[in-house]
Image: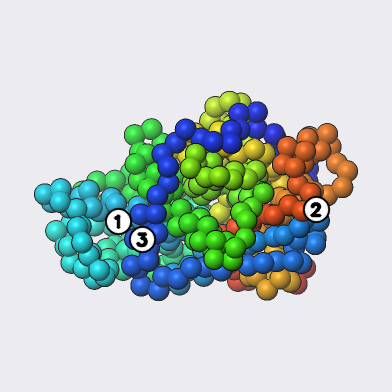
Amino acid sequence: MSIRTLVNPNAREILDAPVPDRAPLRFHRRLPGYGETPLVDAPGIAESLGVGKVLVKDESNRLGLPAFKVLGASWAVYRALEERLPGGEGFGGWGAVEELRERIAPLRPLDLVAATDGNHGRALARVAGLLGLGAKIFVPEDMAAARREAIAGEGAEVIVVRGTYDEAVERSAEEAGEHGLVVSDMSWPGYERIPGWVIEGYSTMLWEIDDQLERRGEAGPDLAVVQVGVGAFAAAVTRHFRSPVRSQHPKLLGVEPAGADCLLESVAAGRIVPVPGPHDSIMAGLNCGRPSLVAWPAVSGGVDVLVAVDDGPAREAMRLTAASGIVSGETGAAGLGGLLELLRGGGSRGREEARRALGVGGESRVLLFNCEGATDPDGYRRVMAGAG
């Protein structure tokens, strides 16, 4: 199977959800090393797709890390620590991270805890280091050594769990308590507030896109393509572009690995259903067997089309982005890989219906998210050499 498609019968142009605001962006601007990530015009990719314009939001270097995940991790930690502070007064006014570090002294010792396929765990460990906290990160046993070492390099304790990412999530949840703050982008019954803040944190990159387009005097996209793991990132994109205050609502395409297409299966079933492992795609950040509970309302009600693809299109997309001067890891290139496969000529009736639902043509403006750089350098080199 090269591709599986689903046109979402429940997709709506406007969601009945809280209107996103810029509070996370204002917070992130105060972090050391903050800067807008590039919005890259990629005419070579546009030509390959047969569309009018392709813009790539390049998250391969965000706050010194090779992925966007630190946006969600930092905002969620900030909000969760604020709630834990004695007296319920919150942080109030502050100007530098060092001030936050001092104010959370009464909470120590405290570990920030999460399960990860790589990027979220490394981001959380970086936040822990900034705030003088410990970090305990649970990882599935098949994680690439380079990603595991990068997390440990941030000062975190890395615990390898025999099994999948979903089993690592279950193990991490056991650490919640006075000295363990679980900060997950996955949610489950009774654990929804923090994952909701993770989703809010991702909105910074979307506000940046709006601002970048406004400064250029350019219109927004006709189609936005988003990678789907547990759905937290996809929920942020969907909430932003399906907000009732926006004048333009682009079509949304979600892309998953063929062996971990939990959102596609859940939308098809009309309820959250698990996709059993092993989840062994090279698109490691998307190897998830169940959508996040808190992300589900947005992604199931706002994404127009879902596709699930094998690893081949992701490899092709990595090489195509490299030709445009963009370093894109396996997960970072997954969105482009899914769109490439969908737009190829011919194909099944489902593929044709999906193309019609998105309305992509020669004048279309497409937004892609390079959500990670080369987080597994050896794997990246193999793909670039045509051997991956």
Nearest to N terminus: mark 3 or mark 1: 3
Percent of width and height locating residue 338:
71, 50
* Residue that protrudes farthest toward the left in the picture: 87
Nearest to N terminus: mark 1 or mark 2: 1
Q: CA distance from mark 1 to mark 2?
A: 44 Å
The residue located at (62%, 60%) in the rendering is: 218
The residue located at (54%, 27%) in the rendering is: 271
Percent of width and height locating residue 171:
39, 45
Percent of width and height locating residue 160:
45, 55
The residue located at (43%, 61%) in the rendering is: 70
Q: Mark 2 Cα within 10 Å, few/some/many (few <14, many 20+)?
A: few
Indicate the amino acid at tag 2. Answer: Gly
Q: CA distance from mark 2 to mark 3?
A: 37 Å
Indicate the amino acid at tag 1. Answer: Tyr
Q: Is residue 291 left or right of residue 261?
A: left
Q: Quadrant of the N terminus?
A: top right
Q: Which residue is mark 3?
A: 26
Q: At numbered mark 1, what does the secondary structure look like: helix, strand or loop?
A: helix
Q: Which residue is mark 2?
A: 362
Q: Is residue 379 visible?
A: no
Question: Which mark is nearer the camera, 3 or 1?
Answer: 3
The quadrant in which residue 52 appears is bottom right
